[in-house]
Image (cartoon, rainbow, N blue to C red):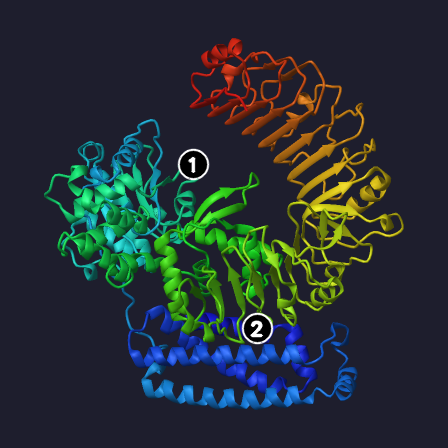
Amino acid sequence: MAETIVNLVLGKLADVVVKEVLLLYGVDEKVEKVSHELTRIQAFLKDADRKQIKDERQKNWVKEVRDVAHSIEDVIDIFLMEIPQNPQMLGKREAIKNMLRKTKKLPAVHNLVDEINQILEKMKEIEESRVRYGIDNFGEASGDIKLPIRPLILPDIDPNIVGFKADQDHIVKELLDETTERRSVVSICGTGGLGKTTLAQKVYNCNDVKGQFDVRIWVAISEKFGIIDVSRKILRELIDPSIEMSDLSNEAEVIFTEIHNYLSGKKYLIVLDDVWTIDLWTQISPAFPDEHNGSKLLVTTRFVDVPKGMDPISEPHKLQFLTEELSRELLLKTIFPNHDLNKSSFDDLSDILDQFVHKCGGLPLALVVLGGLLSKKPRSYAIWCSVFRTMSWHVEGKNCSEIIGTSYEDLPFAIKSCFMYFAAFPEDHYIDAPLLLQMWIAEGFIPQEDNRTLEETAESFLEDLVQRSMIQVDSRSYVGSIKTLRIHDLLRDLALQKAKEENFLLVYSNPDDKMSLSRARRVAIHNSDFDQLIMSPNLRSLLFFYEGSMPNCSKQRLLKVVSNGDKEENIIDLGMFVGLTQLRYLSLRGRPSDNYDQEFFEKVIGRMKYLQTLIGPFLKTIDNNYFQFPESAWNIKTLRHMYSTGNRICKIPTSAKLTNLQTMIGRVWPEQSWEIELPHIPNLRSLELMAISSLSRAVVTFLSTLQHLTNLDIRHDDTVVDILDMRGFPFYQNLQSLSLTYFGPTGLTLHGDMLPCHLIFLDIKFYKFQQDIMPVLEKLCCLKVLILAGAFKSRKTTCSSGGFNQLEVLELNSLSMEEWEIEEGAMPILKQLYIWDCDKLIVPQGLQFLTNLQKLDWRDVGDSKANLVRNLCQHVASIDLGEY
């Protein structure tokens, strides 16, 4: 893992601006030498990380490399902070030299040279110790590449008693499905230790399955598969398992032909257990004939994109974590395999059993390993409590942690830092995905890639972790991006363990953690009892997850990320952030203390020249009810995301020239000066805007400057139709989410293609169209969510057959319509229907045609209509006809 910090440091040294500054100050050659030495070491670190070295001398060498990389990062960051920087001066060497003489900052240069000389001396010692420890053998070839032995799977527990019965029936049904004649893929997906292999074994040995296929074989794959070895395994299982591998051909095409010939004319079932990459299938698929006789491949994998790549038509079966009830049953069965599991028999152990079950989080393998441990202990509440308090889930639970850890070791180096960052969040914490991505960017984890924004690359990293089943998606937006997520407790423990080993991040949750904080580079505080904490002056991140005030962090001048949680009631002492000029991410939810000096803090914020994300703080009281961003924030050229929440507003001044800004969320009001000049924010992607009538023309002109907008929430009170008719805006083809709220008079008309045809989310409030707008809206072929609140006054509306063919959620609120006809074939995949405050509406004709409806919420429907609704919607799983 030291290779990760080396990558980060090398990335910093390769930055164009950093290189230019070092060149101008005449220290580029020294730094280049350091960079060269780090690059030389990097290859050895890759091997060390891949081979998971166990030798203590080698571990110590890796630690020394990591420490020196941290030192390099520190001295460069301190140097860049202390010397004068003016982006307009870059490329003008003589001007910089003159500035140096005037500002007398040469001591900073001398200090940097001295410190780099010390680092080079230390690197020389590390190089000598590498040879002395024999670490130079890391990079040498190791002969024939062999498939690694797979971690031990514990198949002793019958899955029928641990919640697999329904899963087993589902997989068996798919394997026996005779309506699909083509060769198809059936898959079981889930994180390591969830029971995929156990379930597949149960299905493979099912009598019904045995009788369905002419040929059945099981082949265990590996994350480091070799196509020759895998194909040999398959052929050997087919013809004679006793044949030596060396007796088979070593040419892939020859083996493929032999496999193909053997399977031709037969209905076969091939189990490929633990497939890690689609590359395997890409290479080996020609060996399997497709004779449309119902042959199947059963695949277990941690990544849902693997089976989708093998067979896009088949839907992967995602194995779920066990419920607490089933978890408890499995744990008890493992501890007491020959006992009656009558619940009352374990009342004396109930509390501690519940704690163990919660800790395992529904992971079957964790429960089995834990049960094996407890089966060796006396049945005693006190002893089991002692085990819970002292148990290392990564030592005594070795089999479980090794299996889970395999997923971590397989991560690309850049994503390992992203995964370890999850250790900062408390257990069972719902994590805001967009903000997490912005933290990763602020930390420097995300490389700049051609034709992609940093956010797009970060999102691909997050999706990679999802595909690997290392994190759990809690919710997605209707455009498909992840909104909130969680991490399984055991995987969080793994992240915490790795982060602590690498001095990457420490969590302060009890007084025993205080000793380590003085050298930590990132700290997450989960306990408000942090008085007298001594934190490293080289701290990069400080994250708080509790209610209350924050400690003074002005001495941590290298901080890049600061967040005080999500409590709007927090009182913020703004003086704590003086001197934090290196911040990239600042989230201060709450309000400033009553005695703050607004002018002083305007200067503090204005000096944060590298800030990328700003969530608060909110200053400048307006009518004693509102707060807004500091005016100085609009001069920070690096800003990418600005958020305001609650009763707060953002007034965008004409002077704003933020070419990097992508997100502006909150109650954004235009300034009166927009009539003369507009702010320059060309790369906005998400915007919430309030448009008062006197500035509606300026707002329309401003929107005409935005080409990349994908999410727009606009409220206005003018009759100007230009905002409603979006055909002239440059973002027309890109817009995916649109919220329109109108407080003006009635009389507007919606027609044709005024709204973007690619909209996925549409929310229209209070427009009061006189027409029936359904015929216009139902032609939006990508629309998934539609909310109409007080949006039109027509007495009757109709949803036509074939209309709204992608709609999943429909909310009708405060409409005066009386009749609603739903033609057969309209809204064919609608899942959720909400009808609120539509007092005059009679039971819609055609409600029974919504065959995919899963939830109907019709508030205050009345007794006279309720029975009819229930009769028409007997197929709907959830019906709520209650009061508000």
Q: Determine the image quadrant of residue 761.
A: top right
Label 2: few (<14), some (14–19) or many (≥20) C-alpha neighbours in 10 Å:
many
Badge 1 element: loop
Which quarter of the rendering shows the N terminus? Answer: bottom left
**Residue corresponding to mark 2:** 556
Residue type (three-letter) at the residue carrying disc 1: Ile
Q: How many marks?
A: 2
Residue at 55% in and 87% down: 116
Tell me the quadrant of the picture where the C terminus can be found. top right
Tell me where residue 753 appears, x and y as whole percent. Answer: 73, 30
Disc 2 element: loop
Label 1: how many Cα within 10 Å (few below 14, some 14–19, many 20+): few
Q: Is residue 527 left or right of residue 588?
A: left
Q: Residue furthest right?
A: 676
Residue 223 figure quarter: bottom left
Residue sitting nearer the eye, 635 or 346: 346
